[in-house]
Image (spheres, rainbow, N blue to C red):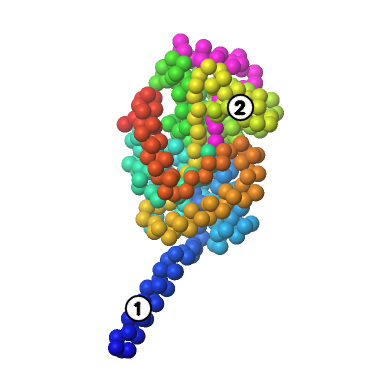
Amino acid sequence: MQRVAAPLLAGLLAVVAAQESAAQWKPEKPVEFVVPVQGGGSLDQAARAVQQIWHDRKLVSVPVSVVNKPGGGQSLSTVYVHQAPGDPHRIGLVSSTLLSNHISGTTPLKYTDFSILGQLYTEYVVITVRADAAIATAADLVARLKPAPDALSVAVGSARGTTSHFGLAIPLKRAGVDIRRMRTVVFPSAPASMTSLLGGHVDVVTGPLTVADPHWRTGKLRILAITAPRRLAGDYATIPTWREQGIDVVVSNWRFIVAPPGLSKEQVRFWDDVFRRTVATPEWHKLLEKYQWVAEYIPSREGRRYLEQQDGEYRELLADLGLAK
């Protein structure tokens, strides 16, 4: 009996040790935090802020580098993340192009082709023109585009079909503008589109508040509308919403974290815990206040359900824009 029991006990102990090891998984080599835009954009700012918090708080015990992979309407970064199946050391911060690039046929990759680690935060979109533009209000913009949708050039960062794009296209559609005829110009990033606006090369920019903010504060830009449900606080309280200007539209510019397919439950659990602890830090809350990001952290399991719902809505929106495959 003892000869049988000893090997059995040893086997059981080995299984328990393996389970404990798996449950306590942590990164074993440097982590790449991939963003789909050039340096300086909203997504880049967020990734570098998270990187700093992880370093200062020692939430991740290995080096973390932010890797910028712009191009392909943000599809190059998701392809790069997807190319490392089963590797939990490569994660990506993504926007709505995770859905729209597949729906429009830009990439065969769907959100279900990734390990979803959850939503980090969300933010709202602003519509901006130069301070010396003849367009003073959102109503002026609608009046100009309703009879001639291509009368003005509209710049977006990274890709068509993003929530930045939706932030103008949806309210214009509801106001009776033929949004398929909009003259949309795509730039590599939101800062690049803003530079073009300041230089007088495009007429309107739709994008994150964080990118418009410094130029708005110096009086170079006029913000016509924000896609928030109500006015923001502090200095931003002067920016009107679409709703109060007669168009009942709210557009949330969500930011999700994804990883390659095939991560284990233990690896997803590790990243869930890291991001949960990250968004609870005072440093993160200061960043939310600074950039007017919205604290809407969603863990991995709920995140996948959220993206499933968003995918259905995006198919309808992209069809309206003539961008659905």
Q: Measured along the vertical axis of the image, is residue 55 above or below residue 210?
A: below
| The furthest residue to the front | 1
> Where the N terminus falls, by quadrant?
bottom left
| The furthest residue to the top | 147
Q: Can residue 173 be spotted in the picture?
A: yes
User: For this view, does 275 lie left or right of residue 308?
Assistant: right
Q: Mark 2 = which residue?
A: 231
What element does badge 1 sit on? helix
Q: Residue at x 54, y 22 (%)?
A: 242
Q: Measured along the vertical axis of the image, is residue 62 above or below residue 151?
A: below
Q: Where is residue 143 in the image (x, y as percent from the top left)?
A: 51, 12
Identity, as a three-letter code, of the amino acid under mark 1:
Gly
Proximity of marks 2 and 1: CB atoms separated by less than 8 Å: no
Q: Measured along the vertical axis of the image, is residue 171 above or below residue 292?
A: above
Among the 4 quarters of the image, the one containing residue 14: bottom left
Residue 148 sits inside the magenta stretch: yes
Residue 219 sits inside the magenta stretch: no
Q: Which residue is drawn at 50% across and 19% down?
A: 247
Identity, as a three-letter code, of the amino acid under mark 2:
Arg
State the count of labels.
2
Q: Mark 1 = which residue?
A: 11
Magenta segment, which residues?
Answer: 123-151
Q: Can residue 129 be spotted in the picture?
A: no
Q: Mark 1 packing: few (<14 Cα in 10 Å), some, or many (20+)?
A: few
> Where the C terminus falls, by quadrant?
top left
Among the 4 quarters of the image, the one containing residue 265: bottom left
Q: Position of residue 155 (x, y in %)?
A: 51, 27
Q: Mark 2 packing: few (<14 Cα in 10 Å), some, or many (20+)?
A: some
